[in-house]
Image (cartoon, helix red, strand yellow):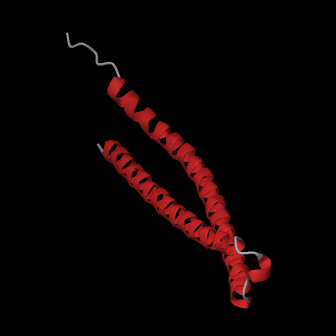
Amino acid sequence: MPEEIELEMAKIQRLREVLVRRESELRFMMDDIQLCKDIMNLKKELQSLVAIPEKEKTKMEKQREDELIQKIHRLVQKRDFLVDDAEVERLREKEEDKEMAEFLRTKLKPLDKATQSPTKPVI
């Protein structure tokens, strides 16, 4: 029946959307992990410079310290943006889920009625 084919296509489309979402989530996690690693590495280097008494630091060490602080700040901002973007995406997906559920409900009702219609006994 055309209705069953349409419903099956909707289910396949839904599965595709779920897989695309999962891929997006995994990409987000990879980006987040990489940003955290980068931040940690920069922090370690910064800690080693901060451990040097201020009077003993060279001009290059002071410049590097400033550079590291700026880089860390930029990476933290980038990560904040990434997290905010992921939250917006999550809310959008939640709304799409509601719309899809409603669509499937409206498509399933006619099919349920068609398959449950009582058959008259033949006498």
Q: Where does residue 44 sit, x and y in percent of width and height?
A: 60, 68
Residue 65 appears at what percent x and percent y? 70, 79
Q: How many marks?
A: 0
Q: Nearer the viewer, residue 110 or 92?
A: 92
Quarter placement of the C terminus: top left
Residue at left 66%, top 65%? 81
Tell me which residue sits at (64%, 72%) in the image: 48
Quadrant location, the N terminus: top left
Query: Furthest residue to the right?
Result: 55
Residue 104 higher or lower than 96, as above or below: above
Q: Is residue 30 left or right of residue 76?
A: left
| Outermost residue toward the top in this view | 123
Could you say where residue 122 lies in the image, as x and y percent from the top left?
Answer: 21, 13
Quarter assignment of residue 108: top left
- Asked whether 62 or 52 is in front, the reply is 52
Q: Position of residue 4 (x, y in %)?
A: 32, 42
The front one of 15 and 82 is 82
Furthest residue in direction left, as rendered = 123
Q: On the rendered structure, is 8 left or right of 106?
A: left
Residue drawn 61% across the image and 64% down it: 82
* Relative horizontal placement of residue 46, taking residue 108 as reference (left or right): right
Compared with 114, 43 (above or below) is below
Identify the residue at horizontal 28%, vertical 15% (top origin): 120
- The residue closer to the viewer here, 39 or 107, is 39
